[in-house]
Amino acid sequence: MYLTVTTSILAAVMPAPRQPIEIREFPRPDLAPGAALLRTSRSEVCGTDVHLWHGRLAGVPYPIIPGHVSAGVLESIRGRLDGLDGHLLREGDRAVFFDVHRTCGACRACTVHRTPTRCPSRRVYGITDSAREGLFGGWSQAIYLEPGVGVARLPDRVSMDDYIGGGCGLLTAVHIRERAALGPGGSVLVQGVGAVGLCAIALCRLAGASTVLAVGDPASRLALARQMGADEVFSLAATTAEERLEAVKNRTHGEGVDVVIEAAGSARAVEEGVTLVRDGGRYVIAGHYTDVGASTINAHHHINRKHLEIRGCWGSESRHFLEAIETLEAHGEIPWRAIGARTYPLASLNQALEDAEAMRITKALVDPWA
Amino acid sequence: MYLTVTTSILAAVMPAPRQPIEIREFPRPDLAPGAALLRTSRSEVCGTDVHLWHGRLAGVPYPIIPGHVSAGVLESIRGRLDGLDGHLLREGDRAVFFDVHRTCGACRACTVHRTPTRCPSRRVYGITDSAREGLFGGWSQAIYLEPGVGVARLPDRVSMDDYIGGGCGLLTAVHIRERAALGPGGSVLVQGVGAVGLCAIALCRLAGASTVLAVGDPASRLALARQMGADEVFSLAATTAEERLEAVKNRTHGEGVDVVIEAAGSARAVEEGVTLVRDGGRYVIAGHYTDVGASTINAHHHINRKHLEIRGCWGSESRHFLEAIETLEAHGEIPWRAIGARTYPLASLNQALEDAEAMRITKALVDPWA
Amino acid sequence: MYLTVTTSILAAVMPAPRQPIEIREFPRPDLAPGAALLRTSRSEVCGTDVHLWHGRLAGVPYPIIPGHVSAGVLESIRGRLDGLDGHLLREGDRAVFFDVHRTCGACRACTVHRTPTRCPSRRVYGITDSAREGLFGGWSQAIYLEPGVGVARLPDRVSMDDYIGGGCGLLTAVHIRERAALGPGGSVLVQGVGAVGLCAIALCRLAGASTVLAVGDPASRLALARQMGADEVFSLAATTAEERLEAVKNRTHGEGVDVVIEAAGSARAVEEGVTLVRDGGRYVIAGHYTDVGASTINAHHHINRKHLEIRGCWGSESRHFLEAIETLEAHGEIPWRAIGARTYPLASLNQALEDAEAMRITKALVDPWA
Amino acid sequence: MYLTVTTSILAAVMPAPRQPIEIREFPRPDLAPGAALLRTSRSEVCGTDVHLWHGRLAGVPYPIIPGHVSAGVLESIRGRLDGLDGHLLREGDRAVFFDVHRTCGACRACTVHRTPTRCPSRRVYGITDSAREGLFGGWSQAIYLEPGVGVARLPDRVSMDDYIGGGCGLLTAVHIRERAALGPGGSVLVQGVGAVGLCAIALCRLAGASTVLAVGDPASRLALARQMGADEVFSLAATTAEERLEAVKNRTHGEGVDVVIEAAGSARAVEEGVTLVRDGGRYVIAGHYTDVGASTINAHHHINRKHLEIRGCWGSESRHFLEAIETLEAHGEIPWRAIGARTYPLASLNQALEDAEAMRITKALVDPWA
């Protein structure tokens, strides 16, 4: 049915910041009880991988095998593997997994504050797991799913390319939409048309938003933003902030949108975002995954008098992972796969990083068997 | 039982920004059906009145009779007057009223967005009502309660001085506490120990907070903050931001407090506030009633990664007014009246404004019959 | 452009419970400032009208002109008419209005408890307004829109038939969906496939539900339920409660659905509903508009141990009215008009009531000019 | 400093339903890494223990050592023990623990639905843990705290008697109060004056409720209800349901209370509760820990038209445990210890069960070293 993973597994390793990616050989791992080996069909190169390459994230245990969100086929399972989706998983199943693992479920962040994405024990495949520990990343022919990792069946009607096209951006966007509390009939503006922003556009549309606007560049991504569901898009380069504000007011009874979602990762976006949301609205800030500098806000005009809510949004929880799968299954009409314009073999991942950084692609798909 | 309001009523009028307050005589108004005349027992001079005097609020229809929150005795009622508290009001009753009126209940802010404090029709006694229209302010021997104003009986056990000691600061603080969603057992830090901050301290304590901290000056207000319920107070002048951060972390398992409440009206307070709240916590910004300049925030460190919620809080709704009365009735042990250190007659209100501005007093009480 | 309403207006009047509907002539009303006259294009005969005909609602001031939700063209406006949707309305505009009026916005229900649908001043066109007062119902060639009624433009792309096909059922369903707090990816079962249930099915689907199930009869309505978006339907007559429970569990990992919506108006439905929802789920009860007797529930098994939430849902607010319009505008692909299978002239409304009661039609459309 | 636990530990064992309690000897357990041994100072006999004795709970692995909530001194710790309260625990510390353990933090109930009290892996000391596994109950001189159990320091100012006086009833009541969403100024009626009801009364009062009413019997408990903070109490035997309804309406502007809390465990209480709550209010059902039969409710009058919310409340989470400790520390003025009227040695626990069942005591305290 599928190529068997042999005793020798190839993976692309990021040895240290700003060092070229290297192909290394790993032994086939022994499985602990409850563990599984996933033969990787697709992984991705996303904006976080570019940050990793530049060493912009603190505490990364280089060398690492990047690739946090991935999909594949269960090659081997030791013991019983219950899916988070309620299915019993079997060898040969098409499967995906929640890249965040080892959230403890017992610390104050997990239990008292109910903020599991701030759990200090939390680890993420492809980011905080060292290649010294084994196959903990998707840029590899196989991934070690340690016991306790949240696994789910990939529904038949969801292609591997659609799953990875959504990828980590979709998981983040599911959390964003929840945090935005956007209901049917609401209006929303998304800042940024990278993978997160594009997925947020689609999810807001699917959640029944009456108006979905987007701001960003370049033109190719704005065109994709329309395909994902945006009613109108604004080029950051070709319009001024004043023009955007006026256009937004014109579409919203002079009020501003109910919700602004920041997925741009720009300090200037934050300063503009507070002007575009209506009084009593919500502003979700989700694009500042790394430090890009300070924003200047007038607390009287933009927060206090406006009765505004600003909500940071960090990471995702396993229920967002499940909701992402359900969304992909129910909405094959959305061009998720178009977010990942090109598919690279392991040998071309240095090129993929360069293409992503140059914004030639929104994200790269990785096929480790190509 | 009480002095009768005669045909001639004295009121203190603010003719224009930076002009001295003048005593003027007004005729006893005719009452429309459903209206009432309140013989004023106590009104107040608060920080907003100082702002009004300096012309810092937009759209004020000078000349005005200041004094938004007031208490008195119902001198005359035309027709039936049902209290918002469920009581039928009668002439001779001790009564108070919600200073916000003409909220339309029909516009998009009122109905669709459920943000009545942003209703464009909303007016406020003593602030947005011109003296040309009549007795719409508390610095007067009598106040015209037009039909539709929310009136309530002042419970027997609440003194006029306690009601005005709480005053507009208490109404604002009730909304703040609701917006803060502070539950029993939570930890909170209040920035600012003016009338709003002091009331917020008391309300957080009464709502079951396990830890209540306060930052501000001068020493006399910090002492009052302790009486209102603060566990520990920090002098802004005598401590550094680093010392305050360390002290807060020490009291909160190294996390920061669950909730920070900004009632300081300082752009620097906003910058410090985001560092004092824990990951996943809430920051209510309520002190920026006027524009005091911009704040600089790092969206990565202080909002996104922190999974923080920042909530502006503007004005109050009538249910906050009722909750304020219920709180005063239930908690006579709190020294509400101590917030209003001194009582001034109408003739001394220029002095009262100067004393308030110089921070010699937190707020002034006004006795228009003294 | 359209037929002018002359000085004599025909309306169908329900003189008293169980009396035949009569056609009466009304004079063209004088308009108060802010009022308007709507030339009725479509109104409806819904289940509530059948209840009215049988005298099952308390306090109805017969004679009445039934027809609560209606659509038409603005024949005449006195003064300025601002739409609740932010548009300025003009004579000749296609327009609709929120049938609930005179909600006071000032009483304890409106302000303190924020439950405007329980406001004692609240009145409803076609139900609580007497024909003695004038044209307060849609079974008439024209409707008097008194000052303060919430009016909105009917968007160009929404047909009169689609608007009334949704009608009062859609307004109720918008409130239900909000109350159900159903998010994307959730599972839902709707009890009842009348106008409310059918609209709830569509709204849950549009809100991103992953699974939408429905229970009811007859077969024609179940077929329509599928067209509105149901994944699977169960005939109440052709399946047992045990079979339905098993089928629901099979589709939901053995858990039950996240949300059950009761739109059946049956005491037995309530008893079944609590078994079909998962632990920690929500059960919205919205079909018991009249008293159909008592239900028997085991508080241990069905509420306490289940950590269940049961939420009654009464009436609608104006924001639900606006959301209904936005939904109709955005989702013309839904066969709203199919809910109203047949269109009746005023002269045939006795027949329409009989057809509705016999469940030959889900609802009737009324064309008072036919 | 304290008596050392020797190699032989005495515990009171419930061998099977309706069998007398027996004293048995257990060996001192070996500690796994991260485990601890708690020398029991106080445990309790509560209503659940009476249910256990009668075999009314399903799936209990008799023989068991009852006693779910307990307090003691840490006799021995293997490795490091971090408290859920942020403290590092040391041998000799006064300590308490969350009786619910092995909640998995990974299943659908824990992660997707966020209902950890419905986690199928969840176990409870003294209830679902067999004596065959060791010292998993408080009716014992020592308790084995397995790795992962949530432990916290008992604050110096909280006595063992106050902690157990609150006990499991307080933990349940903390969850109830959260679920009730009772804010300052609200009105509440508590049905039942057992340990849960008494604690709920105190918590509602501490949360700022303006009106706290209670219904129950016998007179001694009603007297204690007043001491816990009830404004007015109604004897179930000495008043009729009509009288209670009238009294409640009289105190609440004719509306009914904002919140009713059911802590009575009676099917009749449920039927009465829905009449006592106001339109748009909330009814928390928390007393139906076991099946006491069905209740009859009219969905039109009591749920739908009333726009009511009914919320089941099952078990507690660890944050409720922490909040209970913080409440005890902050509010030593509440007579928590008075809930546990009498202290029994291990040898008298058959008598304690009889006394509890006969309602001679609200709960019993257990001193296993007496």
Image (cartoon, coloured by chain):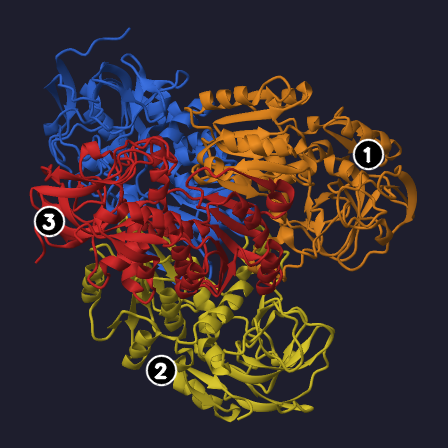
Chain colours: A yellow, B blue, C red, D orange
Q: Quadrant of the N terminus of chain A?
A: bottom right
Q: Report, in whole angstroms, how far the alpha carbon at label 2 lies from the one at label 1.
A: 71 Å
Residue ID for mark 2: A359
Labels 2 and 3 in the same subunit: no
Residue C28, visible in the rendered structure: yes
Q: Secondary structure at mark 2?
A: loop
Q: Counting other residues with Cα less than 10 Å from the Cα at mark 1, is it few (<14), some (14-19), or many (20 or more)?
A: many
| Kind of residue at badge 3 | Glu
| Kind of residue at badge 2 | Met
Are the residues flagged by discs 2 and 1 in contact, CB closer than 8 Å?
no
Q: Secondary structure at mark 3?
A: strand
In the image, is C365 to the left or to the right of A337? left
Q: Nearer the viewer, mark 3 or mark 1?
A: 3
Q: Nearer the viewer, residue C43 or A129?
A: C43
Which circle marks residue B70 in the picture? Answer: none
Q: Position of residue D351 (x, y in %)?
A: 85, 29
In the image, is A303 to the left or to the right of D349? left
Residue at (65, 26) in percent of width and height: D335
Residue ID for mark 1: D367
| Residue projecting furthest to the top | B1
Residue ID for mark 3: C75
